[in-house]
Image (tube, rainbow, N blue to C red):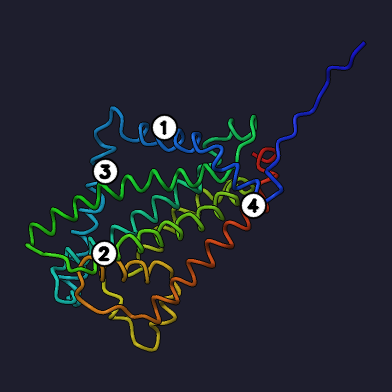
């Protein structure tokens, strides 16, 4: 009698070149996951779209009142709401992408345990979905600029570069956290706290130029400092960039991305078993 028992083994590609070729091979799955999440978020909903608009607007109002009116911090020669909103753009993109990508594997556990595909597709598609929110928020910024009759300078040509850096920071941190989230499920409670803390230690409601000179370089090790300063410089063009701080932030982003990708690939072979 023939033995029909068999064992299904699902493992990540060991060959790095073959693995990244697989990502291209599974590009349709990437599109499907991203489009599915966008439809789930916006289809037949009102609050889904409104929340993307209301949240940065409310944050802008609160920070403007607290830091601009009460604390009377400098606005670097631009209306304080513009100072805040130009920082809310990259921060909202980063925080949404980090939260969604960190939960992407857990949210698709059934797929992971049944079939092989490069797991990198899931957190990457989650970051792309967060970019849709960014585009909506950017349209709100344009309207705020029109309201204040503010015209951006040619620095805006550098904006795609800082968007790309934000993407790398969110994806790198998201890869690290989603791998940890698979093994240690309580990390899903840690991520929102880290995001909330990061909002207040990053120069969202204030300009990083108020940081004392002796601490500027240390402060710039926060990767979002260079990103936010870059966004403000590209959109508002009101103050020159602090180049040493920008380089420090870029190095931190690069380190986060490489280490996150390395840790994700190292633990990827166990996802199907653990999840």
Looking at the image, do the residues carrying marks 2 and 1 touch, with CB atoms under 8 Å apart? no
Residue at 58% across, 48% down: 181
**As drawn, which residue projects farthest toward the bottom?**
214
Is 83 placed above or below 130 here?
A: below
Q: Which residue in the protein does label 1 denote? A: 36
Q: Nearer the viewer, mark 4 or mark 2?
A: 2
Counting residues from the start of the chain, the first of labels 3 and 2 encountered is 3
Q: Quadrant of the N terminus?
A: top right
Q: At numbered mark 4, what does the secondary structure look like: helix, strand or loop?
A: helix
Q: Nearer the viewer, mark 2 or mark 1?
A: 2
Question: From the viewer's perspective, is 138 left or right of 212?
Answer: left
Counting residues from the start of the chain, the first of labels 1 and 3 encountered is 1
Q: At numbered mark 2, what does the secondary structure look like: helix, strand or loop?
A: helix
Q: Nearer the viewer, mark 3 or mark 2?
A: 2
Q: Nearer the viewer, mark 4 or mark 3?
A: 4
Residue at 31% across, 76% down: 208
Neighbour tally class for label 4: few under 14, some 14-19, many 20 plus, Cα within 10 Å? many
Question: From the viewer's perspective, is 4 left or right of 22?
Answer: right
Q: At numbered mark 3, what does the secondary structure look like: helix, strand or loop?
A: helix
Report x, y in % for residue 124: 48, 47
Q: Which residue in the protein does label 2 denote? A: 157
Observer-nearest of 84 and 58: 84
Q: Which residue in the protein does label 3 denote? A: 51
Is 125 placed above or below 226 here?
A: above
Is 42 placed above or below 137 here?
A: above
Neighbour tally class for label 2: few under 14, some 14-19, many 20 plus, Cα within 10 Å? few
Observer-nearest of 74 and 254: 254
**As drawn, which residue projects farthest toward the top?**
1
Q: Which residue in the protein does label 4 denote? A: 265
Q: CA distance from mark 4 to mark 1?
A: 25 Å
Residue at 68% across, 43% down: 12
């Amino acid at each position: 009698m023939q033995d029909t028992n068999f064992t299904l083994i699902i493992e990540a590609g060991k060959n790095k070149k073959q693995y990244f070729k697989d990502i291209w091979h599974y590009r349709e799955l990437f599109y499907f996951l991203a489009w599915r999440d966008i439809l789930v978020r916006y289809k037949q909903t009102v609050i889904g779209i409104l929340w993307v608009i209301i949240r940065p607007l409310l944050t802008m109002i609160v920070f403007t009142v607290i830091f601009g009116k009460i604390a009377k911090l400098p606005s670097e020669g631009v209306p304080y709401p513009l100072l805040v909103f130009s920082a809310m753009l990259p921060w909202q993109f980063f925080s949404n992408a980090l939260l969604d990508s960190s939960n992407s594997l857990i949210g698709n556990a059934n797929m992971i345990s049944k079939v092989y595909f490069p797991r990198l597709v899931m957190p990457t598609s989650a970051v792309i979905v967060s970019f849709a929110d960014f585009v909506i928020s950017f349209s709100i910024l344009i309207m705020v600029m029109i309201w204040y009759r503010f015209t951006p300078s040619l620095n805006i040509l550098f904006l795609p570069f800082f968007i790309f850096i934000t993407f790398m920071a969110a994806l790198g941190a998201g890869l690290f956290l989603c791998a940890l989230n698979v093994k240690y499920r309580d990390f899903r409670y840690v991520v929102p706290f880290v995001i909330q803390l990061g909002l207040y230690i990053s120069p969202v409601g204030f300009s990083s130029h108020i940081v004392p000179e002796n601490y500027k370089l240390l402060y710039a090790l926060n990767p979002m400092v260079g990103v936010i300063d870059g966004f403000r410089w590209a959109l508002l063009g009101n103050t020159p960039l602090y180049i040493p701080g920008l380089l420090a932030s870029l190095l931190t982003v690069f380190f986060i991305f490489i280490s996150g990708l390395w840790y994700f690939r190292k633990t990827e072979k166990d996802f199907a078993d653990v999840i």
